[in-house]
Amino acid sequence: MCALMLEFAKLRRRNVWLICFGTAALCLIWMASSAARTAQGSSDGTTSLLSMAPIVNSIVLTLFAAVISSQACETDHEAQALKELLCLQRPATLFAAKLVCSLTLITITVALETGGLAILAAYKGFTDQLSVVEFAAFAICQIGPTFTVAAVVQAVALRWENQFVSLALGLALSLAGLFSLFFPPVIQRLVPSGYFGLLSCVRMSWDAATHVTSSYTVPFTWGDAVLLVAICATVIAVSSVWFSRKEL
Amino acid sequence: MTELTIATHALTKSYSGTRVVDSIELRVPEGAVYGFLGPNGAGKSTTMKMILGLVHPSSGEVDVLGEHMGRKNRLEVLAHVGSLIENPSCYRHLTARENLDIIRRLKGLPVSSIDEALETVGLADTGKKLAGQFSLGMKQRLGLAAALLGNPKLVLLDEPTNGLDPEGIHEMRALVRMLPQTHGTTVLVSSHLLSEVEQMADHVGIISRGQMVWQGSLKELRACAKRQLAFRTTDDQRASMLLGATKQDGWLLAPFADDVTVARLSLALARAGIGVVRIEERSESIEDLFLAFTEGRSL
C-alpha cells in the first residue's frame, strides 16, 4: 500500500486525474452522439449504446492505458530515480506498485464511463435498463483489456527510457484493436485491445436487405476471459522477472 | 584492528568476456572518507553499483556494515546506506521536500528527518520551488540530501562534484569532509580527480583498468613518494661522479639523504674545489604516483 501511495505521490502535478476525467468524458461524448440518434424511450437504446463501447474503448481506453502506464514509468526514468529506489525497495514491489497504480486509474475511468452511460440511458428513458450487476460486468469487461494493454506498455516503458516507443506501441495496439473488431474472433484474440469486442455481450448485426443495424445480446464468453487473464498474467510475470534482473 | 565498513572479496564483473572490474579487494575503514580514484572508465561506478546490488557481480562477494550482502538481506543492509550514483535523482515536478518525502517514506523515517537533511545541504529555504527550477548545484545537493536522509552509517557518492561550479565543488567537498565528524558516517567517494580526493579523503584506493592498483591511507600514499636531492654546482661532471648522481634538466639528482649526510656531501664537494650553487629536496608529487600506478609504471 505504501508503494502504491508513493506512485501517486510521484505523479503529483502530472495531471493524471485530468487525463482520467478527459478520457471518460471523451468516451461518453462519443457514445452520447450515437445515443442522440436513438429515439427517446427506445426499447433497445441501452443495448445499442453498449454495442458502441468496443469500438470507442478499443481506441480511447487503449490509448489512455498507454499514456498512464508510460507516464508512471517515465516519472522514474526522467528523475533517474530507479537506482535510488531499487536500493530501498524490491524491483517486484516497484513493478507491482506501478501496475496497481495504472489499474486504479483505469478502474476509476471505466467507473466514470459506466456511470455516465447509466445516467445517459436513464436520461434518454431507454426501457431496456440494465441492472447494477450488468453494468458492473460491463465495467469489468472494459477494465480487463485496458489493464492488459497497460501491462504490455509498462513492460516496454520500463525497458526503454524514451517513452516514444511505449506510446507508439499504445497507438499501434489502439489501431490494431479497432481493425481487429472487423475480423474473425481468432484474429481479435491476438490483440489485447481486440478483447473489448470479444468480451462484449452485445453484438451488432446489419441486415443487407433492410439496411438496418440491430443489436443483440450473446452469452458471456468465459473462454476469451480466461485467455485474456492468461495473456495478462504471462505478460506481467515475464516483464516482472525481466525487471527484477535488470542491471542499472 | 579497524572495523571495515565495506570489504569486497575478489569482486569481478565481466561484460561479454571483458573484465571491467577484476578481483577488487576494496577495504573501507569505519569512519573514513575513502577516495576511490581512477581514470574515466576504470570501473569505479560499476564497483559501487555492485556494492549496492544494482549490478550483479560475475564473481566475488561484498560485505557491507559487517554483513555479507545477499539477495535476501540486501534491502535490510541498504536501509543504513545512502547513495548518489552517477546523477542525482530528482523529480523535476516536485519540490525538494516532496522529493525527499518519497525516500523518507521508503526508509520509514520521521518527517523531521527531511528538515534535518535539507538543513545539512543548505536547501532548507527552497519552499515551493520545483526541483526542475533548481540549478545543477542545487540538484546535486538535493541528491546528497536524499543520500543523507536518516543519517545512514555509510554513504556512497559517485563523482559528486561533476558539473558543479567552483563554489559548488568547494561546498560539496566541505560537506563530505565533515560527515564522519558530524554524523559518524563512513563515506566512499569516487573521483577521477586526484586533487579532489586529496582534499576530501583520508584513505585512497586507486583503480585502473578494473584492477585495484593501490590502497591505503593518504599518509601512506604520500610516504610512497620518491624523494631525491637536486644539486647545481660549478662543475657538474666531477660532482656527479663524487655524488653518484645523474644529470637531468640541468640538475644533478642524487638519492635522498639526511641532514648530516648532506652536510658531508657539500663539504666533500668544496674540498674537491667544486662550488655548490644550490641544493634542493625534491619529492615526487602524488600526481606522479597516481600516474605511475594507473600507467603500470614502477615507483
Image (spheres, coloured by chain):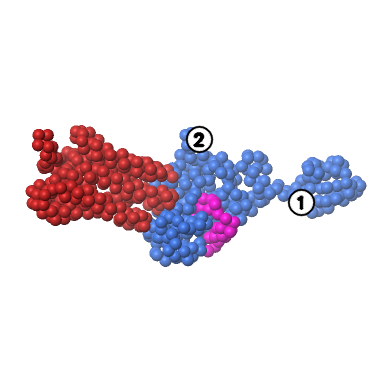
Chain colours: A red, B blue
Residue at 47 percent across and 53 percent down: it is B88
**SS for dot 2:** strand
- Mark toward the start of the polypeptide (2 vs 1): 2
Q: Main secondary structure of the magenta part?
A: helix
Q: Is residue A225 visible?
A: no
**SS for dot 1:** strand
Residue at 56 percent across and 49 percent down: it is B191
Q: Amino acid at mark 1?
A: Glu
Q: Which residue is mark 2?
A: B18
The Cα atoms of the two marked residues, 2 and 1, are separated by 44 Å
Query: Residue B269's spot in the image, x, y percent?
Result: 87, 47
* Neighbours of disc 1 within 10 Å: few (<14), some (14-19), many (20+): some
Q: Quadrant of the C terminus of chain B?
A: top right
Query: Residue B77's spot in the image, x, y percent?
Result: 42, 53
Range of the magenta residues? B155-183
Q: Say which quarter of the image contains residue A195.
A: top left
Position above or below: B101 against B191: below
Query: Residue B240's spot in the image, x, y percent?
Result: 83, 42
Q: Which residue is mark 1?
A: B281
Both marks 2 and 1 on one chain: yes
Depth order, front residue of B124/B253: B124
Residue at 67 percent across and 50 percent down: it is B223
Q: Is residue B273 left or right of residue B26?
A: right
Position above or below: B145 against B225: below
Depth order, front residue of B120/A123: A123
